[in-house]
Amino acid sequence: MSRKQAAAFIQALADANPAPETELRFSDPFTLLVAVVLSAQATDASVNKATETLFAAAPDPAAMAAMGEAGIAVHIRRIGLWQGKAKNVAALARLLIERHDGQVPNDRTALEALPGVGRKTANVVLNVAFGQEAMAVDTHIFRLGNRTGLAPGKTVRAVEDGLVRRCPPALLRHAHHWLILHGRYMCKARAPECWRCVAIAHCNYKDKILDPGRRSLPAP
DNA sequence: ATCCCGAGGG
DNA sequence: CCCTCTGGAT
């Protein structure tokens, strides 16, 4: 896929999605980081509910560290893997104070050294909170990148690099969010709904699936 | 039953 | 690369 085509693909997703302000529930690095850590293998709704009371009680690393593992657990008991996450978040808050003066670090090495923070979480924080050229690739984006030709690659790293290189800089900050939603709800693993895809005109997927009720793809 | 906007450990 | 951790939604 050409660079121009890739740009058009992502632009189509941008045009179809709400304003960035509405998709970012967490504006500061700390709450964003914790929310992403809690999101692992959990549904959005359950995480949103848990973070609402958690951040009301502890909006910053100092309060979170003071709250401790047991205190944090009270707020997140309804999301999966909550035991490990409570432990990680408590330690994470403590480490932010000990190592980084209570601030979320803006480099990959320091982020990934924090408990519960892997490559994907680090990339989200680097991109959204610090505006760096990083793209978070999960199973959805990996599949979408390869299937559509937007960012082919056998490894997560390759897909990450492809996206960073091909995404228009102005769209980089929110592109992974659009991509993951698109991959999750439209470009699905089993039954992609290509007939309602906003980017189908810029997609190289060879087996585009048409709505049984339609004879042709809609005009782009 | 299967999957989830993963990470850590073997 | 494999496995495990875990509750909720569909």
Image (cartoon, coloured by chain):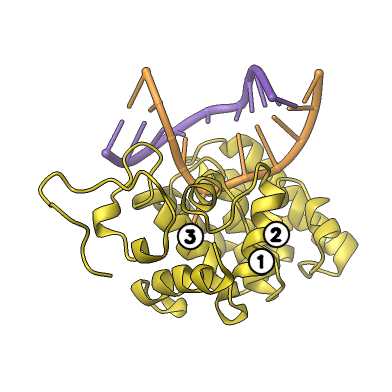
Chain colours: A yellow, B orange, C purple
Picture layout, residue A37 above or below residue A133: above
Q: Write down the chain letter for disc 1.
A: A
Q: Check disc 3 and report its element: helix, strand or loop.
A: helix
Whether discs 1 and 3 lie on one chain: the answer is: yes
Q: Residues within 10 Å of mark 2 (few under 14, many from 20)?
A: some
Q: Residue at x 62, y 48 (%)?
A: A71
**Amino acid carrying mark 1 in the image:** Val
Disc 1 to disc 2: CB gap under 8 Å: yes
**Amino acid carrying mark 2 in the image:** Asp
Whether discs 3 and 2 lie on one chain: the answer is: yes
The residue at which mark 2 appears reads as A161
Picture layout, residue A82 above or below residue A219: above
Q: Write down the chain letter for disc 3.
A: A
Q: CA distance from mark 1 to mark 3?
A: 13 Å
From the viewer's side, name the closer residue of B3 and A59.
B3
Q: Which mark is residue A197?
A: none
The residue at which mark 3 appears reads as A179
Q: Residue at x 25, y 58 (%)?
A: A196
**Amino acid carrying mark 3 in the image:** Leu
On the image, the x and y values in percent for residue A9 come to: 45, 68
Q: Residues within 10 Å of mark 1 (few under 14, many from 20)?
A: some
Which quarter of the figure has residue A202? bottom left
